[in-house]
């Protein structure tokens, strides 16, 4: 009788995307074209206890590499029936509670300028630490949301690490909170009927955390729904191997499939340099308890099969369900962290499925 073998690097520690039989063939082909299919991509020998200057230098170099990659990717989406839909865009700068100002970029369908439409506040990925709001991957995603018939509002929150200085937790979250409160106060002016929070990876963290903060501070009725794609929410990337195997085994199963625990731990250190917020659900929503979650609005959680972060997304889904929250979860098979998001030309069917799942979720609220 054949013995069972655990999937991915749980059963074969040397496995990579090039040898994992589950990987989507179009995804692997696209990743090979950019040389990002190996386990060594974006990794470091630094540990989370390394000097902060050394970590920040490595993280900023990673940001340069990712931004360079994003600039070279074909972001066209075959069979996107909305591609010809015209959108109208504007910008506004708003104040935040801690004396900062945050830029909002607002997109809406040009033919619906006078109609009330649902709004999706979009928080971009990058582990709450890196990547520009202005890069093409993020801006074109918001435009795609708008072309489905939504008002898409990009929140230019502060990254925890920039070339000019550090803005650790809760700076970025405060910006996201201020954006939601401002949009709510200007619903009539903006022509908005509902407010939904949405983000991928670190942006998924901020979407979930903003909803938790809204509940904690007593303004939860402002938020009608939350969508989190491949959320980066545990902060547990430097936890002992035994803990990860027991609690979040995908951190081992898919470690190094585009992203790694080692690099994620460094990003987490930049977000919370002292570690005093390691179990704070506003910093890391994975640690939310039932009382934190009860009464939250409906959620949509989207994960990917070959993502180290998939188990924390699944765990959050289960916590929401146990707390009585209306929640739906879906997993993209054969796909890495954000694979269909930035390699959308190769995986257009999956990109469009995510896009329209979010639109359907918003419409049903």
Image (cartoon, rainbow, N blue to C red):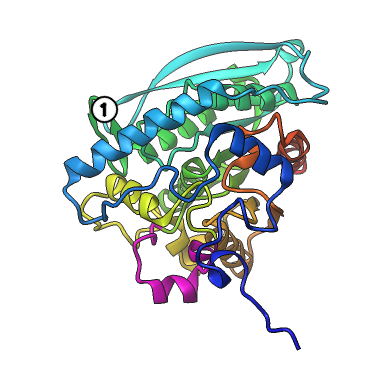
Does residue 55 belong to the magenta stretch? no
Which class describes the residues within 10 Å of circle 1: few (<14), some (14-19), or many (20+)?
few
The one nearer the camera, 7 or 268, is 7
Q: Position of residue 94 (x, y in %)?
A: 40, 21
Point out the stretch of residues depicted in magenta: 235-253
Q: Is residue 17 visible?
A: yes
Q: Is residue 119 above or below residue 278?
A: above
Does residue 247 belong to the magenta stretch? yes
Report the residue that reaches farthest toward the bottom.
1
The one nearer the camera, 267 or 191, is 267
Q: Going by the image, does 84 lie left or right of 113? A: right
Label 1: which secondary element: loop
Q: Which residue is mark 1?
A: 99
Q: Going by the image, does 269 lie left or right of 31? A: left
Q: Could you say which quadrant of the image residue 82 lies in?
A: top right
Q: Quadrant of the N terminus?
A: bottom right
The residue that appears at 65% across and 10% down in the rendered structure is: 88
Q: Position of residue 120 (x, y in %)?
A: 61, 32
Q: Is residue 294 visible?
A: no
Q: Going by the image, does 67 lie left or right of 48? A: right
Callout count: 1
The residue that appears at 73% across and 21% down in the rendered structure is: 147
The residue that appears at 70% across and 12% down in the rendered structure is: 113
The one nearer the camera, 162 or 281, is 162
Q: Position of residue 63 (x, y in %)?
A: 38, 32
Q: Quadrant of the C terminus?
A: top right
Q: Is residue 248 above or below residue 130?
A: below
The residue that appears at 31% across and 33% down in the rendered structure is: 60
Q: Could you say which quadrant of the image residue 57 lies in?
A: top left
Q: Position of residue 85 (x, y in %)?
A: 77, 14
The one nearer the camera, 129 or 66, is 66
């Amino acid at each position: 009788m054949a013995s069972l073998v655990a999937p991915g690097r749980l059963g074969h520690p040397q496995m990579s995307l090039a040898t994992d039989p589950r990987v989507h063939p179009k995804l692997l082909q696209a990743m090979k074209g950019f040389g990002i299919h190996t386990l060594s991509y974006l990794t470091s020998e630094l540990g989370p206890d390394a000097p902060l200057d050394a970590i920040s230098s490595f993280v900023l170099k990673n940001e340069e590499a990712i931004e360079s990659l994003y600039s070279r990717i074909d972001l066209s989406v075959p069979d996107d029936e909305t591609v010809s839909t015209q959108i109208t865009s504007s910008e506004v700068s708003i104040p935040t509670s801690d004396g900062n100002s945050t830029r909002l970029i607002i997109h809406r369908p040009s033919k619906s300028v006078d109609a009330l439409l649902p709004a999706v506040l979009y928080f971009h990925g990058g582990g709450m630490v890196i990547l520009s709001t202005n890069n093409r991957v993020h801006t074109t995603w918001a435009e795609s949301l708008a072309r489905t018939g939504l008002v898409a509002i990009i929140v230019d929150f502060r990254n925890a690490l920039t070339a000019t200085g550090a803005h650790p937790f809760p700076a970025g979250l405060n910006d996201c909170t201020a954006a939601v409160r401002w949009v709510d106060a200007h619903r009539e002016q903006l022509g908005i009927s509902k407010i939904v929070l949405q983000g991928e990876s670190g942006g998924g963290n901020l979407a979930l955390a903003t909803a938790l903060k809204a509940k904690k501070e007593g303004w939860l009725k402002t938020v009608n729904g939350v969508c989190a794609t491949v959320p980066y929410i545990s902060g547990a990337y430097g936890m002992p191997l035994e803990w990860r195997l027991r609690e979040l085994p995908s951190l081992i199963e898919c470690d190094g499939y585009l992203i790694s625990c080692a690099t994620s731990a460094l990003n987490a250190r930049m977000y919370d340099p002292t570690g005093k917020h390691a179990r704070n659900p506003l910093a890391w929503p994975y640690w939310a308890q039932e009382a934190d979650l009860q009464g939250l609005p409906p959620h949509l959680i989207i994960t990917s099969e070959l993502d180290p972060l998939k188990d924390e997304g699944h765990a959050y889904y289960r916590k929401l369900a146990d707390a009585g929250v209306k929640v739906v979860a879906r997993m993209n098979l054969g796909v890495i962290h954000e694979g269909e998001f930035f390699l959308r030309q190769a995986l257009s069917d999956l990109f469009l499925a995510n896009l329209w799942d979010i639109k359907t979720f918003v419409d049903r609220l």
